[in-house]
Structures are given as structure tokens and as C-alpha cells.
Amino acid sequence: MITDVNQDMDVTVAGAGPVGLLLAAELALAGVSVQVLERRTEPDDAMKAQGINIPTAEALDRRGLLPAAAQMQRETLARTGAPGGWVGDRAPGAVSRFTGHFAGMSLDPELVDWSDPDFTAHAAASGVRLVPQPRLEALLAEHVARLGVPVHRGVEVVAVEDTGDGVLVGTAAGPVRTGWLVGCDGGHSAVRRLAGIEFPGAAPELTGYQAVADIAEPSGLADGWVWSAAGVYRCGPQPGRIAVMEFGAVADRTAPVTLAELQASLRRVSGTDVTLTALRAPASRWSDNTRQAATYRSGRILLAGDAAHVHPPFGGQGLNLGAGDAMNLGWKLAAVIAGRSPENLLDSYDAERRPLGTWVMSWTRAQIAVLRGDAKSAALREVVADLLNTRDGTTHAVKKIAGVTQRIDLPGNHELIGRYAPDLWLRDGSRLADHGHDGKFLLLDRSPDGKFARLATAWPERVRSLTECDPPHAHPSDMPHGHPSDTTDSHPSGMSDGLPVGMLVRPDGVVAWACTSVDDQAIADLSTALHRWAGARPV
């Protein structure tokens, strides 16, 4: 029997990557006993996603982790030698200039309409975007350690059995009993496979690499993205950074990337005899394998992150999609375990996250079609480039990459419902996000007599009410962590008819209810939202 892995925990999370760690932290924050099992004996420091989107940055902000992420960004910029103004250093009244690319076509920040309400509504965290995946994983590892979550490394899941009232997790050292099991163990998820969950989709057509290497004669390679009949490669923007995509080559993704393998692929794609002399850090290998789990839940076994969906990694969409999964699932699973909500609350996890996963799969798959080296794809690339060379086209693409347009389908008529809560400064000088560090629901009440807050007193341990007789606003300057807000007197997204009189924000940052007037219908709708999401009233 295993002696160092806990038995009879409420939840066992398989996988200690960013998704698994973030989920474990959310569960622990809600009072659930949770542990993490990780197959690897050490953290994975291979090059993967190089940044986070705005919903992920805002998730860190709501838990008080944004200052630490900002420090990691500064360290990354210093280490890579990137210019100080590349990310995060903005003039007052501006928003982040982090744009990214679509299918290797860089998106010009000068063409973006940064005054678009979808950007200005989420300016507070938008300047913290350059947090590479290994650094984010380190930040979250410290977070779960502070919360007392045990992370057991070198423990591989080899069997799972849903017993109806719990899950038996088989490992090489013996079985582990747990109430629930969540597979956050990547695209080759053992949990998904052992649970018998189908993973339909499209097989890979290419192999891609990311690396930072020493190049004997770097002048022989062109700067930026370069297409050829064999694939696409890019050198830069940091010295030695290489990205290669080779069509028709499907390599063994389980073996470490060697210098010889990377060099051979780069030579075939670039048509040069370039020589790589050393890898500065472990390189990563990926493919355009695109699949989505048939279900995100089977009984007491759930999936999140790459275990639930895989796709080409353009724009770091997989990391951010997985972080959203963790934030959505954590508070819901905790509520079911505590008996506050019925088990069918978990049905909303799949219903809310699946459409976004499907969209990311389509968004990244479209880029593969544009990236191919054949004549038809080249013609399509010219058409897409023309569209992206417009203000509307670039703004649309950057908004999608940044994640500021994400919305889930929730009942209600207000424009904010189903969207992530916008930046709001309160009368006492705090921000709405500052009140979410403990993972409670937040109820903003601007009614003259506090009717909404009085209704929420029936959930004192779950809902924090913030009463504001004066309208909250976007602060004109001095945003925390050195990130300026939008300009004075502008309104956040979805508030073209004015700021809401009341707004209920779920622990994952999603607006569950909002209204523009105080009347019986608004109170009835709030009551419905509280019962649906915050659960039964305490006895």
C-alpha cells in the first residue's frame, strides 16, 4: 500500500501542471480536502505556452496572485533581453500592446482599436501577459503549498474504478481511495483512457518544435516567419528562439527532443544547412492532433485541460483554456462535495466549457489550413493577410486571442450575464477583484436601500455583498501593479446603458446575474441565481 499518498481525500487530481495545480488550489480554497498525483518526478521545464490571456490573468488577480505574476513577467523580459516596451510598459490611458499572431502573421498593435470596450473593460490585468508556462506552474506550486495541498510526485495512475460512492485509483505502489478523481494529466491522459472516455477528432499531419538554441551561423536563417513547401519556421524575436512546423512528419512525442532531431527538421523546412550547437533549455515537440473528449464527466471522474481537449498550440490557447476549466470546475465540485448544491450542478461544467473548447479547436485548426505550404494555402494566406491588415480585422483577431469576448450561455437579459466581470473600482478605493481572494461569490449592490444585499444575507458564508450607493468606476490612474486603466469616465463592456444597479459574480469571475433597476422582477431573478449557483440556503 502507498504510505505517503493520502487515503479518503475528497478529491484526487491527476497531473501537477498549471491546470491541475489551479484546480487543486480552488478546491482547497473552498474547504475541500485535495491532493495531487504527478507521474513526473520533477516539474516539466520544456518550452510550451509563452504567455497567458486576459481571463487567466484576471483569475490570478482575483486570487491575489497578479503581483507575483507581474514579477515573473519582469524577470522573463530581463532574461530574454526583450525591449522594455514590448509588453506591459504602457502610457497612461493605454491598454496592453500584447497582440500575438494568426498563422504566423504578426498582428500590428498600431492597427488595434485599443479603445474598444472589450479591451477597456479588462485593463487592470491586461499588462501581465508574458508569463511562460513553467513560470506559471512554479507560481501555482507555491500557491497550493501555502494552501496545504500535498503534491505527490513519481506516482503514476495505472487503473481507475468508479465505485459509485468514490473512486479507487490504482498506482504501482497500491490503490488510493478518493471521493472524486479529476484527470488533468495532459493529452495522453491515463485517467481519460482508463475511464473509457472516447476522444474523437483528427489525427496529426505535422510535427512542431519550440526551442532556444545556439546557432552556429544565425545569419543564414531569415528573421520572422518563413514558409516553404515543407513547412514553416521562425527565428526570434529573442536570440536563439526557434519554432519549426514540418508537414508530413509525425514524430514520437514521448521521447525527449534531441539537438539532432531539431536541427534535421529545421534544415528540411528552411532549405539551409544550418547547424545548431546546443539547446539552452529542454525543447518541446507538438502536433496538430485535434480532439475533444466525448464527455468531461463520467460519474465521479472528470477531465480538465488537455485531458479534455487537444489542438495545435498557437497563441497558448490550450494553457488558457485549461485554466478556465479549472476555475469553472473548482467551486462547483466543492459545492457538490459540501452538500450545498445537487450533483447535477456538475452538468453545467461540460455545458459551459465544451463550446469554448470547440471554438479553440476551430480557431487553431484554421491556422493550420493557412500555414500549409501548398499553392492553395498560400492564396488563402494572402486573403487572410489582407483582412488582418485592417483596423477591424486586427482588432477582431486580437480580441479573440486575448479572450476578452468569451461568454457562456446563462439565463438573463443583461448584456453582462455570462461574461467575465469587468474592472470596477469601489468607493473605498478597492477594486472588485480585491474582494475575491477567498473564492466567494461577490454581490455588488448599488440599490438605495440595499435590497439585494439583504437577500444575500441568507448565504453569509458563500456570498460577500459590496454595497455602493455611488456608481463604481474605472479608475483614471495608478492601477495596481503598474498597469494603467482605461480613461476616466469610460464604461466597461456591456454597460452601454450604464453600470448595473446589481451584479452577482461567481467565484470563477463569470457574471451570473445583473440588473439595471430595482424592482420585484430583479429581486426574483437574483433569488433564482443565488439558489442555482450558491446552492441551498444554510439551515
Image (cartoon, helix red, strand yellow):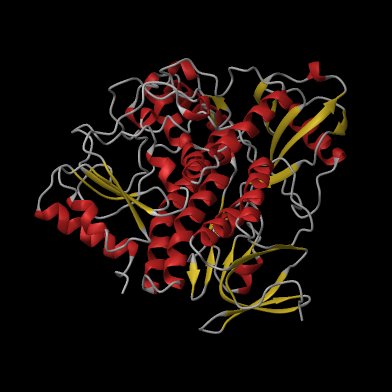
Work out whether residue 227 or residue 211 is closer to the camera in this orientation and state it. 211
- Horizontal relation, residue 254 to residue 148: left or right: right
Q: Position of residue 146 (x, y in %)?
A: 63, 53
Position above or below: 56 against 186? above
Work out whether residue 89 or residue 448 is closer to the camera in this orientation and state it. 448
Q: Residue at x 72, y 19 (%)?
A: 222
Q: Position of residue 283 (x, y in %)?
A: 77, 40
Q: Residue at x 29, y 69 (%)?
A: 537
Examine the rendering and report whether any part of residue 329 can be seen: yes
Quadrant of the image containing the C terminus: bottom left
- Horizontal relation, residue 57 to residue 204: left or right: left
**Quadrant housing residue 497:** top left
Q: Residue at x 55, y 25 (%)?
A: 105
Quadrant of the image containing the N terminus: bottom right
Q: Position of residue 291 (x, y in %)?
A: 55, 56
Q: Residue furthest left?
A: 520
Q: Residue at x 88, y 22 (%)?
A: 216
**Quadrant housing residue 84:** top right
Examine the rendering and report whether any part of residue 228 can be seen: no
Q: How many marks?
A: 0
Q: Position of residue 129 (x, y in %)?
A: 55, 33
**Quadrant housing residue 113:** top left
